[in-house]
Amino acid sequence: MKTNIGTANRDGKETKCHNNYNYKSDPFELRCAKLLKGTLLASLFLLIPLASAHAGANVLTNGSFEDGNFVPDGNGYQSKFPGSTDITGWTVTSSEVAWASNANVDGLTASDRTHFLDLTGYHDSPPYGGVSQTIDTIIGRTYTVSFDLGDSAKSGLYQGPASVLASAGSAGGVFTLGPSAGGNLWQTYSYSFRATSSATDIAFTGVQGIFYIGLDNASVTVEPVPPLALATVSPLFAIPQGGTNRFILSPNNADATVLLDGSQSSDADNDPLQFFWYADGQPSALATGALATNQFAVGPHTVQLVVSDGHDTATAQVRFAVITPATAVGQLMAVVDEANLGSRNKQPLLATLSPAMPSFDRGDFKAGVNQLSAFQNQVRAQVATWDPALASEWITATQRISEVVGGG
């Protein structure tokens, strides 16, 4: 399949080059080979993360204060003093708090289920009480703290404003709920912090309130991290080895088997990943799984990997071209032509190499391999003695072509 890749000057005229031209050693054909080589550079690899946030699991224990050794007094409250750990997961700080149930004499009710805290306690004056809990955190990850702050106008004694200092390590701030217009009022507040330690103290302390600062329904969730998609294709052909161009040799002048590899993709949350491969803009997946193989015709291709962790997705694109052995020889000829051989004449090398192109193009792979072998011998004799690394690069390239067509 011939694809126009641009134009080059030939006898003073701009003439079209195509991707499997029978490049020989004349200047026009070498210019075409160089043009093809330049069509796929380092930009052929593109990583595009796509993400949509999802709610993580609550890592805070007993955020609604339902669990623990609750023994209410006749008013439906139980006082807890600094140092108490009777409320499961929590330690009381600063001053006394009142642990309350919905069955209290003041008609106050929880925002979530049946229990809540009044940070003014029974003492109803500063300093107000608080609670704290230490949670495990992952350094560098972002967490969201959420809680409900309450006040009430059930009685003239309880109308706000109510304020609480909410903190996670050094992050957080003071949150204030204005006076209730009537009845029980709960308002949800939240803030985020980035963990700087493997353990973080989560704390709530009353700051302002007229006989009542309600606290309930606290949670800490880790913000999700989308998966990382990484895609590669193989086996690659490049001169020199490790070059940034992505070419894959066809063994038959028609197509090539390409290995699609997404195994280096990862997920920070360790969620199981699903893999979907798409090619050349087609809407249907051509394969699934971290590793897959597919036949690609001679010519340029774009493969997209979509990785999903069940919540978020990420994609990676790889662009590559399947080339014929003759095109690969043309690329090598361009490299030889560009090489700094000093006073040495490169034309004998090009003359030895160029006959392999028409041989491969007409499907005479045995003759093409023999001609590459002759070029290797000439490189060993004329180049290896003064530049072993350059000689090794060229010999490796020809050996790779020979192996692909079955003559290596």
Image (tube, rainbow, N blue to C red):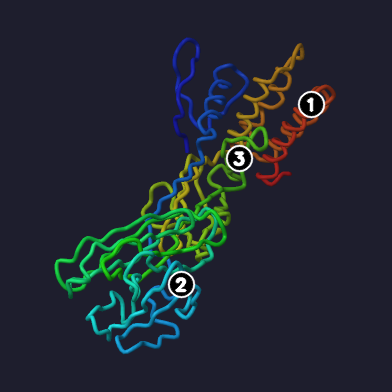
Residue 139, position as x, y percentages in the image: 55, 55
The residue tagged 3 is: 363
Residue shown at 48% from the left, 42% from the top: 46
Residue 268, position as x, y percentages in the image: 52, 58
For mark 1, does the 10 Å Cα neighbourhood hold few (<14), some (14 to 19), or many (20 or more) residues? some
Residue 366, position as x, y percentages in the image: 70, 40
The label number, if any, that marks residue 320 in the structure image: none
The residue tagged 1 is: 378
For mark 2, does the 10 Å Cα neighbourhood hold few (<14), some (14 to 19), or many (20 or more) residues? many
401 or 92: nearer the eye?
92
Residue 54 seen by the camera: yes
Residue shown at 67% from the left, 33% from the top: 240
The label number, if any, that marks residue 92 in the structure image: 2
Q: Quadrant of residue 338?
A: top right
Q: Are discs 2 and 1 less than 8 Å apart at CB? A: no
Q: Nearer the viewer, mark 2 or mark 3?
A: 2
For mark 3, does the 10 Å Cα neighbourhood hold few (<14), some (14 to 19), or many (20 or more) residues? some
Q: Are discs 2 and 3 less than 8 Å apart at CB? A: no
200 or 348: nearer the eye?
200
Quadrant of the drawing holding the C terminus: top right
Decide which of tag 2 and tag 3 comes sooner along the chain.
Answer: 2
Amino acid type, label 1:
Gln
Q: Which secondary structure lies at badge 1?
A: helix
- State the separation of the CA atoms marked 2 and 3: 84 Å
Residue 232 in the figure: left or right of residue 284: right
Residue 233 in the figure: left or right of residue 127: right
Residue shown at 50% from the left, 31% from the top: 39
